[in-house]
Amino acid sequence: MQDFFDNTITSNASSNDILSILINPQLLTKWDSGVLRLDPNSEKQHVTIVRNRAAINTTERLTVSQIANTVIYAIQGNRLNYQVQFTVNTAARTTILNQHVLTDKGRQPHLPLSLLRPIAKHAFLENLHTLVILAEKWSTEIAERL
C-alpha cells in the first residue's frame, strides 16, 4: 500500500460516538453520499458497496476492523484496492478525526492517480463533514436523554 492523501477534521462529538459510527458499516449510507446501500455477505465478514453514481470501482467489497482508536476500511474493488484508516483522538474537549487513504500499488487503474487525488480528497473530506454532523447530532441526542 502507498499513501494517497490525508484529511483531518475536528468535532464536538465524543470519540466513542465517532468510533461507534465508523465501526458499523450499515451507517455508511448516512454519511457517504456516494453509497446507495450495503449488501452483507452470508458470513457477515464484509459487505458489498452499491453506489448511486459513477465511481472508479463499479463494485467494492468492504471489510471493517478496529485496532484501538483506529477503524480500518479495507476495500477491494474491481479496478482499485484501497484502505481508509480513521484515527480518532481527543484534545482539549475536541475530537480530532484523521483520515489516511492508501492505495494498493499492485492494483491500480490505467488512469493516473495523481489526477484523481484532489477530486477524491475533496469528496472524502465532504463525507467527513457529514460524518461529523451525524456524530454531533448523535452525541447531543444521547446527552439530552441523560
Image: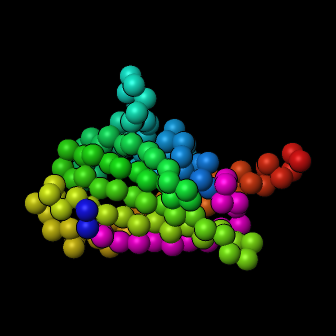
Q: Where is residue 103, by image quadrant?
A: bottom left
Q: Nearer the viewer, residue 52 or 136?
A: 136
The x, y position of residue 144, in whole percent, is: 86, 50
Q: Is residue 122 visible?
A: no
Whether residue 96 sits left or right of residue 26 in the image: it is right
Q: Residue at x 32, y 73 (%)?
A: 118
Left or right of 5 on screen, residue 64: right
Q: Nearer the viewer, residue 95 or 55?
A: 95
On whether residue 95 falls in the magenta region, the answer is no
| Residue ID at (56%, 59%) | 69
Report the predominant secondary structure element of the magenta stretch. Answer: strand
* Image quarter (top left, top right, bottom left or bottom right) of the N terminus: bottom left
Residue occupying image coordinates x 38% and y 22%: 42
Residue drawn at x 32%, y 40% is 61
Residue 11 colored magenta? yes
- Which range of residues does the magenta coloring cover? 3-17
In the current view of this chain or complex, which residue is farthest to the left?
A: 110
Which x, y percent locates residue 55?
28, 52
Snapshot quadrant of residue 85: bottom left
Q: Residue furthest right?
A: 146
Can residue 72 be seen in this snapshot? yes
Height in image: 23 above or below 12? above
Q: Of all residues shown, which one is farthest toward the top?
A: 42
**In the rendered image, which quarter is residue 68 located in?**
bottom right
Q: Position of residue 123 (x, y in %)?
A: 41, 63
| Number of numbered labels in the structure image | 0
Residue 34 x %, y %: 41, 50
